[in-house]
């Protein structure tokens, strides 16, 4: 049984059809990346799966629970890191982790374990005792990423996980995601940086104008479209769909 | 040149559609307020009718009354049968102010050449400024009578020099104030200045409290939305209603703490400011006995009711602020959102200070009472002057309104409206401009 199965997710805003019949699935331990340009509908799709907005049509099943029928159960199986998210500025990094662990954990012992795990992952060391208001963008991103994976969710949903990070940090994050996936955690990522995502994802879905054009392993896609990288794949996919 | 460019940009930023709208609304409200107040003041000042019960009914008293009429006042004569209970008496003659000239008045003044006693009964209906103004007008009535007695004495009855004190101060006024069905021998102005002291700082506390807590929750919720920490919370395994309730309750607790501090601080300040004066009056057992015999002194139960009422207003403003704050996507709109709440609090605040809302024309009264905060501003008066129907009616209205507001707040938090609905006038107008310029 796949960890996530999106079935025809559609979102119609007042004027924009932001997601149009999006279907894909993610297996256990798999890293899936939604790639596409700005305004393609990545965040919209992710928010529907995170139970934040209701789809106009379609459904998604997370670990056996429907986002429509059982959103509470879905929330127990996912974590979500929003794009460009901040944290409570008046808290220290440590306090933030404690607070969030308290939200996810069912008992204090569990919460403690979560925090310990996050402290190791985020790599902020001593600076966790400082107020978040003094953190740099990259530091906040790392803190939030650590928060998103500390509870070992069945599915971690990360919107633009490496945006705002330098090359070294982005690399570190990608490594971390790969390690966690090897341990059985599944990931749904999004990015408009198609070159970077090639290195981290097992599978990609190319989305544009709310429509998921094609999904597959990066190598498969490059072969199929006879392209050197995913950017070229994207270019050809868009052209192909324009012709039809 | 560069400066002009900068200035233009700043002005454009500050003079947004929202701020201009705010100014227009403020103007309209104050214009309306001015009209209402004008009417109220005119009514308070105009009628110079004097209701008199002349039990002496002699040539002398008649010429005194004639002298009053000669000065352009209208004297209404009444002769009630039962005078034992001033409260009932006032109800019977259907007037708010009555001068009683007792039997033997003429004899005391003309033969005994002593100060004669005059009874002066006033009905107090609220503790607002217009009430005090009408009490000023009432004491003017007494001055007119004194003057009339003096001049009648001088003109018609040749008096010797040692009668001069009598001429100067011919009458001794025995003041009686009536509130609902109670009365006490104390002057209207004494009562009104005491109640004013008691009641003045409460509206200030309420106003500050409403503003403070609304602002607090608007900025709390809009920051969470802008920082997207709200998205994280709402996608976490925690009941969304508990997220909402925690926010409301925390704000309510902080607001109540604030209220407590303000109350203590203000009462200390008031005590210090009025020095011994108020203490002297209040501690004089007689006056406080009179106040309580008038039903003006707050019993513990009244304080509980008042606290309940304030808490309700607080909850409503928090609920409204929560909904408003949840609908914005940028910090600037969040700041201007306090505007409607502020205007809703300001209108009844100012009105209740200067006039009695209960005595306004029915249409305006209903409109003002539709603002939920009004009920708190009038609560002290309603409790003091026993308008319990209005008090409980208002309370029920507030509870119903609060339930409706919470229903919408819960709907907002448990559906995806919180992420899709938006109150950004600015962005909307910008988007429209964009569309227009695209054409
Ligand atoms: N709350 C909303 N109301 C109306 N339209 C919206 C809303 N949110 C998003 N949209 C529209 O939906 C479309 C898809 O937006 P979405 O945020 O999903 O794009 P994205 O792929 O995440 O882009 P980016 O890479 O810039 O983050 C856009 O045209 C956007 O304007
Ligand atoms: Mg996005």
Image: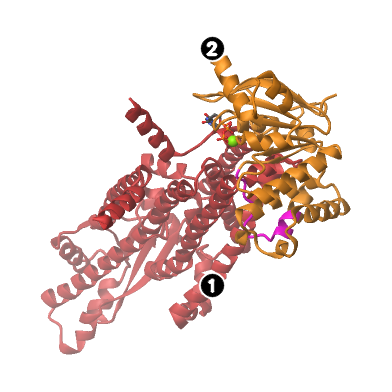
Chain colours: A orange, B red
Residue B128, quarter of picture: bottom left
Q: Position of residue A34 (x, y in %)?
A: 66, 30
Q: Residue at x 37, y 39 (%)?
A: B363
Quadrant where the N terminus of chain A sits is top right
Crowd tier of the residue under label 2, counting other residues whose Cα lies within 10 Å: few below 14, some 14–19, many 20 or above: few
Rendered image: mark on residue B265: 1
Chain under disc 2: A
Q: Secondary structure at mark 2?
A: helix
**Which residue corresponds to mark 2?**
A243
* B424 with respect to A143 (left or right): left
Residue B411 visible in the current orientation? no
Q: Is A191 or B427 nearer to us in this picture?
A: A191
Residue A41, quarter of picture: top right
Q: Residue at x 73, y 43 (%)?
A: A174
Q: Cβ(mark 1) to ligand 1 < 8 Å?
A: no
* A8 with respect to B64 (left or right): right
**Magenta residue span:** A84-97
Q: Secondary structure at mark 1?
A: helix
Q: Position of residue A148 (x, y in %)?
A: 74, 45
């Amino acid at each position: 049984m796949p960890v996530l199965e999106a079935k025809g997710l559609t979102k119609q805003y007042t004027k924009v059809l932001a997601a149009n019949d999006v279907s894909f699935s993610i297996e256990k331990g798999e890293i899936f990346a939604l790639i596409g340009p700005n305004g393609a509908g990545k965040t919209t799709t992710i928010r529907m799966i995170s139970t934040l907005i209701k789809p106009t049509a379609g459904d998604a099943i997370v670990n056996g629970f429907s986002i429509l029928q059982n959103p509470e159960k879905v929330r127990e199986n996912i974590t979500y890191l929003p794009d460009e998210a901040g944290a409570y500025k008046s808290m220290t990094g440590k306090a933030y982790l404690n607070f969030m662990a308290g939200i996810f954990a069912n008992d204090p012992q569990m919460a403690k374990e979560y925090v310990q795990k996050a402290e190791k992952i985020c790599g902020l060391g001593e600076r966790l005792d400082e107020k978040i208001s003094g953190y740099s963008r990259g530091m906040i991103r790392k803190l939030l990423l650590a928060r998103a994976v500390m509870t070992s969710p069945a599915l971690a949903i990360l919107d633009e996980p490496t945006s705002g990070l330098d090359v070294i940090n982005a690399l570190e994050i990608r490594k971390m995601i790969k390690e966690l996936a090897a341990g059985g955690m599944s990931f749904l990522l999004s990015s408009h940086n198609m070159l970077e995502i090639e290195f981290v994802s097992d599978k990609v879905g190319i989305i544009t104008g709310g429509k998921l054009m094609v999904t597959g392993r990066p190598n498969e896609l490059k072969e199929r479209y006879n392209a050197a990288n995913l950017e070229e794949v994207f270019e050809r996919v868009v052209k192909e769909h324009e012709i039809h | 040149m560069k400066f002009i460019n900068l200035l233009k940009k700043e002005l454009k930023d500050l003079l947004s559609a929202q701020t201009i709208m705010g100014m227009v609304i403020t103007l309209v409200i104050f214009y309306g307020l001015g009209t209402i107040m004008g009417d109220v003041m005119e009514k308070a000042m105009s009628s110079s009718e004097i209701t008199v019960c002349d039990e002496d009914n002699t040539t002398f008293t008649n010429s005194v009354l004639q002298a009053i009429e000669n000065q352009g006042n209208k004297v209404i004569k009444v002769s009630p049968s039962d005078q034992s209970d001033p409260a009932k008496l006032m109800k019977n003659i259907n007037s708010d102010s009555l001068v009683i000239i007792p039997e033997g008045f003429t004899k005391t003044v003309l033969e005994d050449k002593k100060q004669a006693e005059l009874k002066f009964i006033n009905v107090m209906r609220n503790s607002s400024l217009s009430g005090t103004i009408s009490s000023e007008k009432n004491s003017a009535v007494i001055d007119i009578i004194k003057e009339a007695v003096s001049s009648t004495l001088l003109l018609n009855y040749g008096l010797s020099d040692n009668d001069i004190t009598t001429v100067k101060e011919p009458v001794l006024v025995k003041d009686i104030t009536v509130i609902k069905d109670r009365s006490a021998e104390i002057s209207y102005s004494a009562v009104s200045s005491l109640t004013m002291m008691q009641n003045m700082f409460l509206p200030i506390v309420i106003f500050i409290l409403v503003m403070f807590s609304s602002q607090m929750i608007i900025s709390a919720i809009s920051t969470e939305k802008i920082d997207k920490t709200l998205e994280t919370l709402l996608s976490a395994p925690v009941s969304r209603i508990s997220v909402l309730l925690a926010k409301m309750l925390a704000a309510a607790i902080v607001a109540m703490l604030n209220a407590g501090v303000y109350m203590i601080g203000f009462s200390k300040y008031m005590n210090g400011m009025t020095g011994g004066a108020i203490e002297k009056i209040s501690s004089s057992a007689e006056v406080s006995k009179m106040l309580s015999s008038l039903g003006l002194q707050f019993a513990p139960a009244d304080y509980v009711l008042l606290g309940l009422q304030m808490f309700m207003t607080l909850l409503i403003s928090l609920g409204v602020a929560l909904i408003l704050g949840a609908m914005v996507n940028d910090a600037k709109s969040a700041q201007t959102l306090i505007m409607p709440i502020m205007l809703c609090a300001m209108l009844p605040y100012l009105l209740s200070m200067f006039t009695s809302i209960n005595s306004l024309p029915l249409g305006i009264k209903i409109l003002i009472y539709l603002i939920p905060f009004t009920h708190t501003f009038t609560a002290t008066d309603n409790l003091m002057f026993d308008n319990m129907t209005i008090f409980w009616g208002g309370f029920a209205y507030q509870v119903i309104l609060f339930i409706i507001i919470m229903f919408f707040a819960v709907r907002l938090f448990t559906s995806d409206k919180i992420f899709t609905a938006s109150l950004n006038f600015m962005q909307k107008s910008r988007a429209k401009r964009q569309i227009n310029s695209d054409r």
